Image: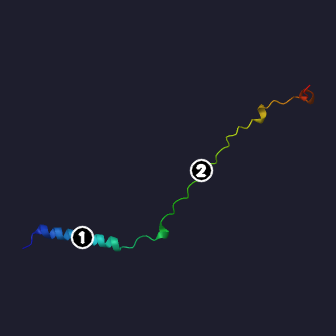
Amino acid sequence: MVSHLVVYQLALIALLWLFLMLSWVWPSEPAAARPIPPTPVPPPRQRSTAPTPFPGLIRQPHCDACGVDG
């Protein structure tokens, strides 16, 4: 007579084989159902490295007579 241990091992192997075959044969998700990865965000614009003077700090003459070099 066959040992119970051998029968249990054969049943376990048969179940594993069945699950592997089912996972191989089972249809997978269609490609349209998968989420589309987001588009990458463009890097921020680079600022100019040339210094620009602030218009409030430039010294201007108070009147036309002061602006005349003389």
Q: Are marks 2 and 1 in contact (CB under 8 Å)?
A: no
Which residue sits at x=11%, y=68%?
4
- Residue depicted at 56% across the width and 58% down the height: 39
Kindly indicate the quadrant of the structure image that contains residue 20.
bottom left
- Name the residue beneath numbered marker 1: 15
- Residue at image mark 2: 43
Residue 46 position, x and y percent, is 64, 46
Left or right of residue 26, residue 40 in this image: right
What amino acid is found at the position of numbered circle 2 in the picture?
Pro
Relative placement, left or right, of 27 versus 7 is: right
Q: Amino acid at mark 1?
A: Leu
Against 43, is 69 above or below? above
Classify 60 as above or below 9: above
On the rendered structure, is 11 left or right of 64?
A: left
Residue 27's x, y, as percent?
39, 73
- What residue lies at 59% left-to-right and 50% top-to-bottom? 43
